[in-house]
Image: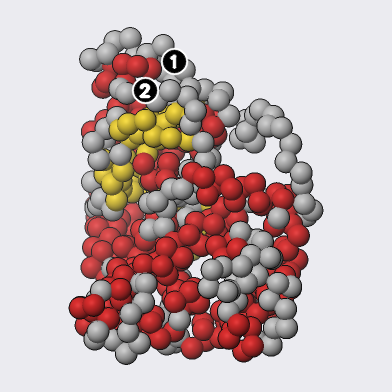
């Protein structure tokens, strides 16, 4: 009996009996990375037929690194997300989570990859509060279990009359919509979420910051096992060193720093009154030339605000504002004919796209093509040459974007082949098109089937309710 006991003890020791398998190896053996996230423009959303979002793309890259499939899990609310990660029912929570001391007592955070500021949001047309004491008698609603609650609790220590409601049903986007609809007075949201949503909710305004900049990071179960944490640490270090992290931040946030209230209101109106007239043409041209039809529609809005009779002071005309030279090159007989203009513009963009160096990858390749559509291939190439001379990457749109404005300065354009150009224009051109594309990408296509006459505004509950 004693020998059997000794034998079993030896087997137990050799097989690490009672010792849990390292978390990282468990994920690899499972063949699946389980990631908690949340629906939203800053985390995870459906864009056409594909999945997108800053957090989603980061998680997908990490899953590819581990050579496993990515499984996204969206809990009912933020509180459940923290419970699931604490209980080890998921590997990572990637949802733009703010690192706070209270949370660090229950979960483990990875390296910081971005910073945000908590901001108080109100509706345009209402009085802007100057400080937190001005809202003590108003309706303030925030997401339950969020870092915003922790911040308000901290402020309440100095302002005991400060009061708020914690909503367990809606996320930040839902609460922003309630402010837009004037169903609540205020909410608190992170600066990146406000920037991403402001084009969808153009009436929203930031009153003031209620916090200092705060770090964002992935969350993992609190454990003595460091295997997953160390792998996440290496992943972010490599993403930062390669510049890939900056490229992702630029992709999702680089074009939304500037908000134009009047322009955003205008495109929302014309989406109903003008876009349905040309939607089929954009779709047909997109299919023929291999583009997203909403990209072509965004170009046309930037060019003419979907006005087929538009004429500029320099003589360019039509929906896509074609020059006479481009019209001749594309066999256009009537620049004011919407169909001819759309197909010619799409075809011309496609010809530019194919002439760019093959090493330029998406999404930069599209932004370069748009910039060349605006300023010409020669001036774009001058901008790329200057970018390289100044030690930056000529195949990176963020790098070239910084240097294109130099083409209007004597010191720099005198060194170029094609000379002077208003280099700031293609930068604004691409930025605006990206903003319009964001707006169109989040529309329900079924609403664009026929021109609609604007009706008096009617207050309705948001879909999330």
Can residue 206 be seen? yes
Name the quadrant containing residue 25.
Answer: bottom left
322 w.r.t. 298: above or below: below
Whole-percent x and y of residue 27? 40, 58
Nearer to us of marks 2 and 1 is: 2
Return the residue nearer the eye: 174 or 343.
343
**Residue at mark 2:** 129
Instruction: Say which residue label 1 marks.
Output: 138
At horizontal 37% and vertical 13% (from top left) the residue drawn is 136
In the displayed structure, does residue 109 sit left or right of residue 186?
left
Rendered image: mark on residue 441: none
At x 70%, y 72%, the residue is 336
Alpha-carbon span between mark 2 and mark 1: 11 Å
Q: Residue furthest right?
A: 450
Looking at the image, which residue is at 69% across and 65% down? 308
Secondary structure of the residue carrying numbered label 2? loop
Q: Residue furthest front?
A: 313
Foreground pick, 66 / 61: 61
Residue at the image point whose x is 23% and y is 36% from the top: 212
Is there any visible trace of residue 89 in the rendered image?
no
Task: Name the image quarter holding the C terminus.
Answer: top right
Q: Position of residue 34 (x, y in %)?
A: 45, 53
Q: Secondary structure at mark 1?
A: loop
Q: Are marks 2 and 1 in contact (CB under 8 Å)?
A: yes
Q: How is the image coloured?
A: secondary structure
The x, y position of residue 401, in whole percent, is: 34, 69
Q: Residues within 10 Å of mark 1 (few under 14, many from 20)?
A: few
The relative height of residue 183 versus residue 315 in the rendered view (above or below) is above
């Amino acid at each position: 009996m004693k020998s059997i006991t000794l034998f079993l003890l030896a087997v137990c020791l050799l097989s690490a009996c009672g010792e849990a398998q390292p978390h990282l190896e468990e994920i690899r053996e499972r063949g699946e990375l389980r990631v908690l996230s949340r629906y939203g423009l800053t985390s995870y959303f459906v864009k056409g037929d594909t999945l997108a979002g800053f957090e989603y793309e980061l998680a997908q890259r990490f899953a590819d690194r581990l050579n496993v499939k990515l499984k996204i899990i969206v809990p009912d609310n933020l509180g459940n997300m923290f419970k699931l990660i604490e209980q080890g029912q998921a590997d990572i929570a990637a949802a733009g989570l703010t690192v706070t001391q209270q949370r660090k007592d229950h979960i483990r955070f990875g390296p910081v990859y971005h910073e945000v500021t908590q901001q108080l949001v109100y509706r345009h047309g209402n009085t802007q509060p100057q400080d937190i004491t001005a809202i003590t008698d108003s309706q303030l609603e925030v997401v339950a279990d969020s870092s915003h609650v922790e911040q308000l609790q901290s402020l309440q220590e100095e302002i005991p009359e400060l009061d708020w409601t914690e909503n367990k049903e809606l996320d930040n986007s839902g609460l922003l919509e309630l402010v837009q609809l004037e169903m609540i007075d205020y909410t608190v949201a992170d600066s990146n979420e406000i920037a991403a949503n402001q084009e969808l909710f153009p009436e929203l305004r930031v009153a003031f910051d209620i916090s200092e900049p705060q770090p964002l990071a992935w969350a993992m179960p609190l454990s003595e096992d460091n295997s997953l944490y160390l792998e996440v640490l290496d992943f972010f270090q490599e993403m930062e060193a390669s510049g890939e992290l900056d490229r992702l931040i630029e992709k999702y946030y680089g074009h939304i720093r500037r908000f134009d209230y009047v322009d955003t209101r205008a495109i929302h109106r014309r989406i109903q009154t003008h876009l349905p007239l040309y939607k089929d043409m954009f779709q047909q041209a997109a299919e023929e030339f291999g583009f997203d039809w909403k990209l072509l529609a965004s170009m046309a809005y930037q060019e003419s605000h979907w006005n087929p009779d538009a004429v500029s002071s320099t003589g360019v005309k039509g929906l896509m504002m074609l020059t006479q030279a481009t019209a001749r090159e594309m066999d256009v007989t009537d620049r004011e004919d919407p169909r001819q203009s759309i197909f010619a513009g799409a075809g011309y963009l496609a010809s530019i796209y194919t002439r760019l160096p093959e090493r330029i990858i998406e999404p930069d390749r599209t932004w370069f093509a748009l910039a060349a559509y605006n300023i010409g291939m020669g001036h774009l190439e001058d901008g790329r040459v200057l970018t390289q001379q100044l030690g930056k990457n000529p195949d990176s749109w963020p790098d070239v974007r910084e240097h294109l404005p130099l083409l209007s300065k004597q010191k720099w354009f005198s060194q170029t082949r094609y000379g002077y150009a208003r280099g700031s224009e293609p930068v604004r051109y691409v930025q605006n098109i990206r903003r319009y594309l964001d707006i169109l990408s989040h529309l329900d296509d079924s609403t664009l089937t026929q021109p609609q006459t604007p009706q008096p505004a009617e207050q309705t509950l948001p879909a999330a309710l």
